[in-house]
Amino acid sequence: MDHESETTPGARATAAPEDFAVVIDARGAVTAWSAGAERLLGHGSRDVLGRPAAALLADRLPVALRRHLAAGVPWTSDLALRTRDGDRVKVQVRGTPLTDSGGAGPWVLTPAATTYQTAPTDAATAELWDLTLAQLPLPVAVYDHEARFVACNQVMSRAMGLTQEEMRGLTLWEIYPAPPLGEIDRLQRQVVRTGEMIFREEQPFRASGEVRDHAWSVYLSPLKDPAGTVLGVSAAVIDITEQYWARRRLAVLNDAGARIGSSLDVTRTTEELAEVAVTGFADFVTVDLLESVVQGHEPQPIPPGTAVQCRRTAQRSVLSGCPESVVRAGEVDVYPPGSPPAQALITGRGAHYRAGDPRLAQWSTSSPARAESMRRFGIHSVMMVPLRARGITLGVMHLLRHRTADAFGEDDLALAEEIAARAALSIDNARRYTRERHTALTLQRSLLPERLPRARAVALAHRYLPAGAGDEIGGDWFDVIALSGGRVALVVGDVVGHGVHASATMGRLRTAVRTLADADFAPDELLTRLDDLVIRLDREEGPDARRQAQEASGEVGATCLYAVYDPVAGVCDLARAGHPPPVLVTADGAVEVLDLPAGPPLGLGGLPFESARITMAQDSLLALYTDGLIETPGRDIDVGLDLLTEALRRPAADLEEVCDEVMRKVRADPPGDDIVLLLARASGLGADRVRTWQLPVDAAAVAGARRAASGQLAAWGLSELDFSTELIVSELVTNAIRYGDAPIELRLIRADVLICEVSDGSGAAPHLRRARVFDEGGRGLLLVAQVAERWGSRHTATGKTIWAEQPLPH
């Protein structure tokens, strides 16, 4: 082969190796690259396979050469090529078409024959052509019009493991009756019959003369005489093993990117990793995570020379049921110090081992079950790949081969490490999410009431359902607060947003509502003060916190519904701040969505809230809920309300059954948001449990009030409370007469506790003080506080009421 050194700076002349060979397909892409081509130009096969051949040229192709290419005829020409280092080298090469497709088919480039000073004779040309085919570094064979073997070159003979004489006159299936050669034999007959070329790519298989699997591109071309009659078929085979595995690795990476990390669940993510690895290039895969990672904690560095404890979270095999496994999913395995998986975890670097490696043998023999599994299934190659994310090792992936004949190599290790890196990031995201969700859920649970209070005047039931595992915890909440006079406050609220911030805000609002409820504010006044609190909290948090909350959920703010049921009067006062309206079911079964004034959501400020009063007779049912129950993507809110009213139309006697019925008929599955449902059935307090006396503004009325109260206690069978009740009545009535205004009223209520109330027409609030030794008064409320279990005061439309509660005797 002749070379001409160019005068251009950087040009050089070099002797091309005799095994120089390049195959270019019909698209102009390099499909085969010999070792000689790599030595000449410095480009490895990975660098050029699948890339345009034009990228290797240093100059444009000569015009005459372009005409030869278009005509599809052999040519010899000087080509200026670019080396990997950027140098230019001019070489003389021979281009031979592998088909007669008029230049559209593949070409093989080989070293040009020695340049002759005189034109060769026809015989010399034929001899050179025969030598080219015989010495072509690609398997080539020729078959006759019956698709029977005629001749082949040396490379094909070596690949088949047979001489030409042994194969002559046989069909390909008769030569080697094994897939996929049977299909190729059929295609050769098709080429003879149709006269059209066929191209086919075969997945890796092992020919009889080969020692390992190869992937091949097969070009089957008709051989025609000048009249166009098909005389036979030629088979040119190109080894595309490296290209095949490169595409396969790329497909595995694409598959990993599409399948791994579909959910924020640690176990599911590891299962996806195992599935991708088994589908891609391993026969058995296990994924073991450090115990701290499984629990959602931050893993700590592993000291060298220590045993490592991991939990098996996923495993997959080409065999059904993973019979190779010696540790079941969910169980803990301990890696001895210095074992391959322990080394991978400690060093953070992967490694591959073959059967017979002392380190692998020592690890396998440390467990009789593992040693038996490796022997029984013929496991001959193992890889240990750590799962690392953000510089932290989370676990290790084991990859084993027993069905695949080839052992793991460096390419496999690089592929496994890249997949493991992607999966580890998803696992760490899932771990962090699990920890945050657990924190938010724990916080939210701690802020919600553990159990509803027991009240004689009202029966209660509730359901609280957080959104599914794929969503963050929201700020839905509810509460039931026992008020004075046997009344009960029912609260349902929803902080817009998700996560810890929403749960913390919910906790603040719930605490504020309890504080305001203890002060006995009317529902509209309570929401007004709660609105002020939300505005103040928003200002204290500042714009950065508001922006972060808004970015997390898309919205800010809160809604609330506050209701106060009075069992003595049989009424319920309600007000709502942007919250869905409650539903009332009367004793006769009529269902009504209460048309309450909507009110603005909390946090807007400057807009009024309005209260409404409804009658709640005996056995009436009031349903309070959050929007997650009736609102869901793809369903109108009105449809959700209709489903709710239908579910409540014939309520069961047991409120728990009513809750179940509502959940079954109304909620979406899975729910898109947190759901709260609170049911309250009015029991009422009959006239026999309430006694009221009107008192004159006269000190002499105190004794009469004591006698009336004592008589009523005797009628109720509560004489044990006679002394303490007389003391409470005496002190409260005396204060009302001394410091209050008319009208003065005494009321006793027998509910779950004994309630004593004294009302007067003055709005002045009482206060507890400690009298000095020689003071004649000032000890009344102090005595009441010591005798009663609870006491307090509330403002009324006509003045105030001071009340005291005592527990009933067993």
Image (cartoon, rainbow, N blue to C red):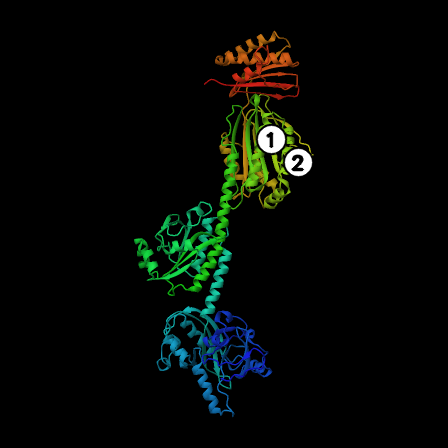
Tell me if residue 264 can be seen: no
In the image, 518 versus 153, the foreground residue is 518
Q: With 261 as the anchor, is 575 left or right in this view?
A: right
Residue 602: % across, % down: 64, 36
Give the residue number, with chain letter if any, for mark 1. Answer: 562
Residue at (57, 40) in percent of width and height: 502
Q: Of marks 2 and 1, which one's residue comes earlier in the chain?
A: 1
Tell me if residue 680 can be seen: yes
In the image, 59 versus 229, the foreground residue is 59
Q: Amino acid at mark 1?
A: Tyr
Residue 616 higher or lower than 240, as above or below: above
Residue 570: mark: none
Residue 597 higher or lower than 754, as above or below: below
Residue 331: % across, % down: 38, 48
Give the residue number, with chain letter if any, for mark 2. Answer: 600
In the image, 250 versus 86, the foreground residue is 86
Residue 630: % across, % down: 57, 39
Q: Residues within 10 Å of mark 1 (few under 14, many from 20)?
A: many
